[in-house]
Amino acid sequence: MLAYKLLVSNPVILGRVSGLYGIKGWVKVFSYTVPRNSILNYKELYLGQEKDWQPVRLSGGRCHGKSIILKFKDFKDRTEAETLIDKDIATKRDNLPELENGHYYWSDLIGLKVIQANGHELGTVKKFIETGTHDVMVVEGSQEILIPFVYKEIIKNVDLVRQFIDVDWDWS
């Protein structure tokens, strides 16, 4: 097992280890990537949470039903892999592909303030839910609000520099 830690500034979370698979160190992963199996394409991965990250190398991975299963090189059996449950899987921002205008990585939007056209602040983006039609932004404020992420129709402006999202959404 890896015994050292590495500081990764501004990591992008790609998924989370959600359970164990078999006895040879494989883990089940909930992937946040779209499509889910694109997490398998990243060569530089880190495991951890917040500011405590360790580099890991994949020795295998594949789709398994609706999940992804991964095998990390230095975790040889189920007991070692058990220490990975609930760890985030991340990469450096430089490893992400460029996006078209009007497209964003969810990780860039989490924590941004959400403001209505009249200037009323609804809260901050807590997470996203992937649905069949549109992704849905979960906004946490005085109450939890679900807002479809439909760019230009509902989402009027995303300002990553000033850290806010303008919406045209009447949630009452």
Image (spheres, helix red, strand yellow):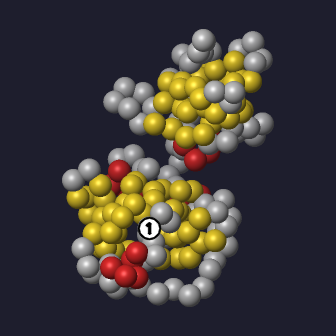
Image: 155 above or below 87: above
Q: Residue at x 60, y 85 (%)?
A: 4
> x%, y% of residue 53?
59, 72
Q: Residue at x 36, y 64 (%)?
A: 19
The residue indicated by pointer 1 is: 85
> x%, y% of residue 22?
24, 73
Determine crowd level at label 1: few under 14, some 14-19, many 20+ residues with C-alpha closer than 10 A: some
Image: 144 above or below 120: below
Q: Residue furthest left?
A: 65
Of helix, strand and loop, which one carries label 1? loop
- For the question of whether residue 165 can be seen, the reply is no
- For the question of whether residue 46 can be seen, the reply is yes
- Foreground residue among 43 and 2: 2
Asked which quadrant contains residue 164, the reply is top right
Q: Residue at x 64, y 33 (%)?
A: 140
Image: 165 above or below 67: above
> In this image, 150 relative to 165: left or right?
left
Q: Amino acid at mark 1?
A: Ile
